[in-house]
Structures are given as structure tokens and as C-alpha cells.
Amino acid sequence: MPRQRHSTPDDRQRAFEALVLPHLDRLLGFASRRTATLVDAEDAVQDTCLRAWAAFDELRDPGSARAWLYRILRSVLSESSERLARRARLLPITRLDDVHESLVAGSGESVFDEMAHRLDREVLQAALAAIPEDFATAVELHDIEGFTYAEIADTVGAPIGTVMSRMSRGRRLLAAVIAERGREWALGAPVDSGIRRMPRSS
């Protein structure tokens, strides 16, 4: 498919805004769940827009703009020093597996569906931040952002089978985090206490 062509700079600006502006709120929400402050999230989205503008003529299919923007945003976030700093204190994945086996064994996805329905934004953000980025991204893009498996595969650059596997594992890990920390949160413990993003899964 050929590159987009715009007859004037104003046409290019209007076309860019028509494709990007409808996604800004969602992009900011995605970024805010992966950064320490709203300012950091806003900076990441602004950087995303700048990169998208620079590469706009390379977007061959306007219908894939949403996945394209999320792909750029993920790249921006992965390059930030803030993301590296948030890896200092982690919930061990083996510990979460043990929690899942003992508390929600055999029904991880249904347990996650039920719990996620009841979670407020702050708790969900903390739970997502406690599991590896690959798993968190797959679950968030599908269950929160409404991406299809094919769109997620395109966004993260992985086969659909890998996306489905990450979805299944991610839901189980989230159910384990919520099961383990839910009582503390219910009793008023800060939802971000001890919660930091785990490294990218291998």
C-alpha cells in the first residue's frame, strides 16, 4: 500500500489530528498505568505524538492507526528511565504461581473476570504493575482497551498464539495478586505499597 500523500501542510495536519485525537485519552490512561505520575504519562503521550507526526507519512493504512499509536507509545515507555527505576522491588512470579494454585486453582480466568469487574481503577493499576509487562500489556489491551488478538499481535510484535498464551497467564497472575493483596487493600493499605512492575518475561 502506498504512503499517505497530502497536498498541503494543512491537509497533513488535519489528517493527523483526525486519526490521533480520538485516541489521546486512551493513550494517556495506558501510559498512566505504567508511569509514576500523571506528568510522566503526559510526557510519554506527547513524545508519542511527536514521533507519530514525524512518521505519519509512513502510516500506510489509516485503519491501523490505533495499533500504530500504541506501538509507538510502548516504545516510548520502554526507553524511559522511570520504567527501569520501577523494577527495584518485585513480587516474585513463583510466589504468585503458588498463590494462584492454592487460592484460585482451576478457575483463574473466571476468578479474574469476577475480580476485575469489582476493582476500582487504582487497585487495577496496582495489580497490573505487579506482573511482568508482557502479560500486563496483553491483558490490558484486550480486556480494558478492547483490542482484538490480531491487533495486539501487531502492536506488540508477537504471534497470535503468544498473545493468547500471555493473556491466559496474565489473568492468572492478576488473580493471584488480587487474592494475595486484596485483604490488605480492603483494610486500607496503600494500593501501591510494595508493588512495582516485574521485568519483561523471557
Image (tube, rainbow, N blue to C red):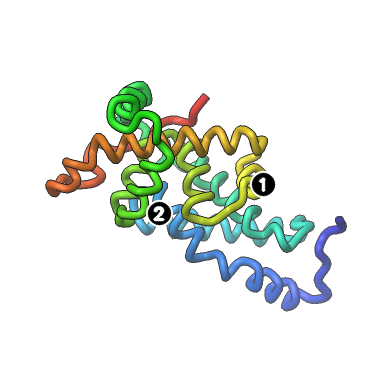
Relative placement, left or right, of 129 versus 191 is: right
Question: Can residue 85 be spotted in the picture?
Answer: no
Residue 76: image location, x then y, percent: 54, 47
105 is higher (above) or lower (below) than 12: above
Q: Amino acid at mark 1?
A: Ala
User: How many numbered marks have been drawn onto this rendered protein structure?
Assistant: 2
- Mark 2 lies on a secondary structure that is helix
Do the residues under discs 1 and 2 have CB atoms within 8 angstroms?
A: no
Q: Residue at x 35, y 48 (%)?
A: 114
For the N terminus, the quadrant is bottom right
Residue 177, quarter of picture: top left
Q: Which mark is residue 150?
A: 1
Which quadrant of the view contains residue 112? top left
Residue 19 x, y percent position in the rendering: 65, 68
| Residue at 31% over, 53% down | 119
Report the disc number at residue 32.
2
- On screen, residue 52 versus residue 2, left or right, reads left
Residue lying furthest front: 106
Mark 1 lies on a secondary structure that is helix
- Work out whether residue 99 can be spotted: yes
Three-letter code for the amino acid on which mark 2 is drawn: Ser
Q: Residue at x 29, y 50 (%)?
A: 123
